[in-house]
Amino acid sequence: MIERILPDGVAAAWTTTDPADVRLFPEEEAHVRGAVPSRRREFAAGRHCARQALTRLGLPATAIPTGDRGQPLWPDGVVGSITHCDGYRAAVAARQDRLAAIGIDAEVHRPLPPELHATVLLPDERADLAHFAAADPAVHWPVVAFSAKEALYKAWFTVTGRWLGFLDARLRFDPAGAFTADLLLTREKGPSRVPSFTGRWHTDGAIVVTAVTAE
């Protein structure tokens, strides 16, 4: 499903199960040593997908360690992203001369708890999504927006190395499957040059996936 929303030049791999025979590199193993079995399985499946994406770019299936903010550390010259939710794991990779950054996210397609709406969504975003919901109630629009902001954060962090809160970006959705992001950052919080981010989303009714790129 993730392939539907990716630009040209991005390699992807996904799975709906956790392969039992995934072998982690020592530097990956260190990150999940002592983790509960479910966390270890999802981590290993994500790394398995990431290595498949690398090989589809014609690159070696190397270790992908974890940075101090939990981000995957891709080989030099590569940008990528990994995501997992119940029933779906995916990874994407692209050469850095093709994209400055990419972030993906997958979520179970179900209502976002109402108590999270004000934490995740700006007031005008909530108004937009209510309008979309009236036209297409089969889509759980708040969880689409939650996923889109998770994907945006991953792409943003790749470029800047900085935190981005849910309310630091205003998303504008096209119900046909695209969205843009306006970043709402003070000079003190944001970098001097803010890249342009664009995104796409898709749901099959069970899972929603989002992807954000910066060129």
Image (tube, grey):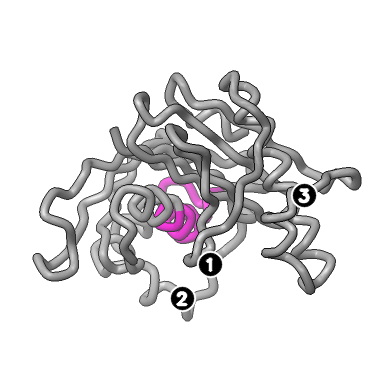
Labelled disc at residue 112: 1
Name the element at disc 1. Answer: loop
Residue 138 on image: x %, y %: 56, 49
Report the Cα–Cα distance between label 3 and label 2.
35 Å
Q: Quadrant of residue 19?
A: top right
Graded by Cα atoms within 10 Å as few (under 14), some (14 to 19) or many (20 or more), the crowding at tag 1 reads some
- Sooner in the amino-acid sequence: mark 3 or mark 1: 3
Asked if the stretch drawn in magenta spans residue 157, the answer is: no
Residue identifier under label 3: 24
Q: Quadrant of the C terminus?
A: top left
- Which quadrant would residue 61 be assigned to in this image? top right
The residue under label 2 is which amino acid type? Leu
Q: Dot 3 surroundings within 10 Å: few (below 14), some, or many (20 or more)?
A: some
Q: Picture coordinates of residue 130 (x, y %)? A: 37, 59
Residue 65 visible in the current orientation: yes
User: Which x, y percent locates residue 1?
Assistant: 62, 33
Identify the residue under disc 2: 116
Mark closest to the chain's N terminus, 3 or 2: 3
Which span of residues is magenta-colored?
133-150
Q: Main secondary structure of the magenta part?
A: helix
| x 29%, y 68%: residue | 167
